[in-house]
Image (cartoon, grey):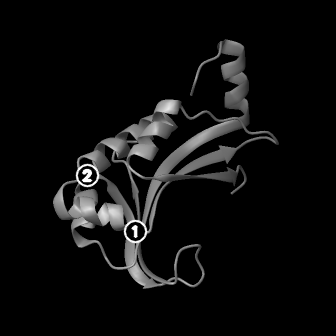
Amino acid sequence: MASFGMGVTRMLEDFMAFLNVDLDVVAKVEPTELHQVLDKKLVTLHAEHGDFRTTRWYRRCWVATYEVRRGPRDVDHAIKQFHHVILSLRGRARTQWQQATVRQMSIGIEQEAARLYSFISATSVARMQEVGCSMEIVVYPRDL
């Protein structure tokens, strides 16, 4: 978390808690080589092909969600790790990454009060842009 002096940093910690960042990949057909590389370098939460009528993704598609292997300290740290993995893609895996219909980093935050403050550095935003990722922010209520 960005530091703006002890009082402000503490105030921000009282209102929100960083949970994790997921990398969501959606493709019309299974990107076998891409999944093999990502599965070796990241944690695969799920990867499946099917008819997803109840989700926000396309109806018939391949969907996978990944996390970094070591728990990130904060949003910027997770994005940096994903950025490194994605930039290392070569050959067919790189092509399949570019052809994916959704390449998204989903930032999970637990809300602990009525207001929410979160900071994502300009460097992290540039990293997501460089690898063609969109951003989603999911705020979970504390009671879940």
Relative depth, front residue between 123 and 1: 123
Image: 18 above or below 104:
above
Give the residue at mark 1.
46
Q: Position of residue 113 (x, y in %)?
A: 79, 40
Residue at 38% in and 77% down: 48
* SS class, disc 1: strand
From the viewer's perspective, is 12 left or right of 113?
left
Residue at 71% in and 49% down: 142
Give the residue at mark 2.
41
Image: 99 above or below 105:
below
Q: Is residue 56 visible?
A: yes
Residue at 33% in and 47% down: 69
Q: Position of residue 2 (x, y in %)?
A: 58, 24
Mark 1 Cα-neighbour bin, 10 Å: few <14, some 14–19, many ≥20: few
First along the sequence among labels 2 and 1: 2
Amino acid type at circle 1 is His
Residue furthest toward the top?
Answer: 5
